Amino acid sequence: MTPNHTKQLDQNYIMHTYGRYDVALARGKGVVAYDEEGKKYIDVSSGIGVNCLGYCDEGWVAAVTKQAQTIQHMSNYFYSEQAGTLAEKLCTLTGMSKICFGNSGAEANECAIKIARKYSFDKYGAERNEIITLCNSFHGRTVTTLSATGQDVFHNYFFPFTEGFSYVEAGDIDVLKNAVSGKTCAVMLELIQGEGGVNILDKDYVAVLFDFCQSQDILVIVDEVQTGVGRTGKLFACENYGVKPDLMTVAKGIGGGLPMGICLCGEKLSGVMTPSTHGSTFGANPVVCAGANYVLDTVANEEFLARVREKGDYLERKLRELPQVKGVRRMGLMVGIEIDGDAHEIAVKCVENGLLIITAKDVLRMLPPLIITKEEIDEAITILKTTLEECTTHETSFEA
Ligand SMILES: *Cc1c(COP(=O)(O)O)cnc(C)c1O
């Protein structure tokens, strides 16, 4: 396959819901990817935080391969050791009580929304069903999770959207309190808004929000789809904030590159869902669970997580040495880089120069594999430095 042929197939047969970089990736190992012509790239995007152990980690490949050769699927009408093992691990590590399996972040959030509403329905009746989310949030692309997403640009074309969502600016607890009514059943938030621009919520705000919601029996749903699985230097970002939500959703990194979305709930909600209130044909697929078990065994390790924090500090220090970098918004290896210039334009140039990097709103965004080394960080910084110099010394043009 040549890159032009691959591009042609994409343009002819795949709906254009994504603006792609002009690269066809063919293979990868660790932090390095290669395109169809063999050109090498340092990847600090890890497929939007999915490949948390990098490309084709040996242990992960072995776990997934072994499971595919043993039993690849059995439907949720049968018990699965891989699913049970993973569920126990997650509950033990988080202190949550029960989990529900799906295949994506959006699905995990749909599940959390359903559980929150059913809890409130069972206890208070049908009227108490509203969920407050934050402006600039991102919770997924289904009709309901688009509703949950607090950005007007996502509320187009697909009417009617799911009712019962309202939005408040993050950071001001009085604004939240004023938005709450007798109909409010939950507040849903990302502790660090990823797609919204790597916006890190204030710790005190989060603490007060949790206390307030608890006092009103309003459930708190924390969307850890992007922040979870070691990304912020703790297994989950909740630990950095010292909070325990009623519902937590996890996806992206958990499968190490295979699709999985999980909704976890605490003790209070563990009996809410009953047979046939929710389900997913592919949910808890044993091959995916085998990969996820391997990911958790690797990442849920204090030394591993300490290295993530240390490498995050190192990366930030290096970034701040670049004159074009105006600021760094970061926790662990979740990084937003404020720069002089157009982030998208710079990202396109970085990719041309061999650095796979993404953007979020007006910041450059790095979500490197958690296994990245300091040497690889240096390589990434070198390419970024060259690119920023190119972009600022002469006007560049690019095709979107
Ligand atoms: C990516 C993301 C989602 C959506 O996940 P999908 O797997 O694309 O459905 C939801 N919430 C957050 C915070 C995300 O970053």
Image (spheres, grey):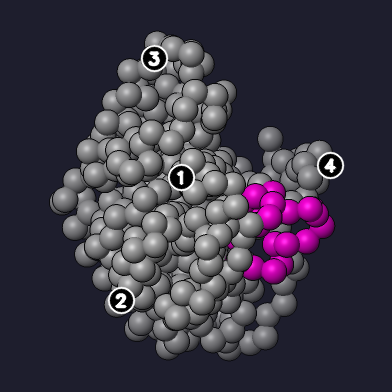
* Nearer to us: label 3 or label 1: 1
> Which residue carries the number 2 mark?
204
Residue 313 is left or right of residue 20, and the answer is left
82 is within the stretch colored magenta: no
- Relative to 98, residue 222 above or below: below
Label 1 and label 4: CA atoms lie apart by 52 Å
Q: Is mark 2 within 8 Å of ligand 1?
A: no
* Nearer to us: label 1 or label 4: 1
Label 2 and label 4: CA atoms lie apart by 51 Å
Whichever of callouts 1 and 2 sits on the residue coming sooner in the sequence is 1
> Which residue carries the number 4 mark?
12
Residue 400 is left or right of residue 213, and the answer is right
Q: Secondary structure at mark 4?
A: helix
* Nearer to us: label 2 or label 3: 2
Q: Which residues, given as a range, are shown in magenta?
A: 143-163
Whichever of callouts 3 and 4 sits on the residue coming sooner in the sequence is 4
Q: Secondary structure at mark 1?
A: helix
Label 1 and label 2: CA atoms lie apart by 30 Å
Q: Which mark is residue 123?
A: 1
Tag 2 near tag 3, CB within 8 Å: no
